[in-house]
Image (cartoon, rainbow, N blue to C red):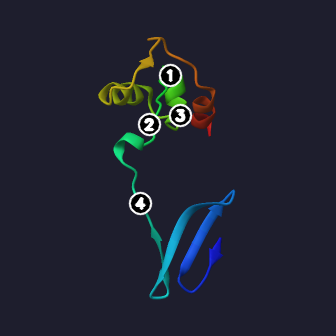
């Protein structure tokens, strides 16, 4: 980063990546937008998690709640329809 009385310049590998202007004892970033045809694209990967994995990722919420929530927000999941065993929940209920 290089600063002077007018502002600052951020460089990475000798390329300017950001510019800031100094106004009223504050720096403000000078931004520009890229046209839509030059914008980056997002790549999305979809993995079908099991109900047990979602149960664990959602902080061990009630299984019926997890199942109904995932259906409500249209998130695909593998539901074995069998009761699964969550060791962490068993230990948590014992204490």
Residue marked by disc 1: 47
Residue marked by disc 2: 41
CA gap, disc 1 and disc 2: 19 Å
From the viewer's perspective, is the residue at label 4 or at label 3 nearer? 4
Residue marked by disc 4: 32
**Callouts 1 and 3 close, C-beta under 8 Å:** no
Residue placed most toward the observer, 8 or 55:
8
**Callouts 1 and 2 close, C-beta under 8 Å:** no
Question: From the viewer's perspective, is residue 80 above or below residue 90?
Answer: above
Mark 3 burial class by Cα count in 10 Å: few <14, some 14-19, many 20+: few
Residue placed most toward the observer, 47 or 84:
47
Quick one: label 1 or label 4, which is nearer the N terminus? 4
Q: Quadrant of the C terminus?
A: top right
Q: Quadrant of the N terminus?
A: bottom right
Give the numbered dot on residue 57.
3
Residue extending farthest front: 14
């Amino acid at each position: 980063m290089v600063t002077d009385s007018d502002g600052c310049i951020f460089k990475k590998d000798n390329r300017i990546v950001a510019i800031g202007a100094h106004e009223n004892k504050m720096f403000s970033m000078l931004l520009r937008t890229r046209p839509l045809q030059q914008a980056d694209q997002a790549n999305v990967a979809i993995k079908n998690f099991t109900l047990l994995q979602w149960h664990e990722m959602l902080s061990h919420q009630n299984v019926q709640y997890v199942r109904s929530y995932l259906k409500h927000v249209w998130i695909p999941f593998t539901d074995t329809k069998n009761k699964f065993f969550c060791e962490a929940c068993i230990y948590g209920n014992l204490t």
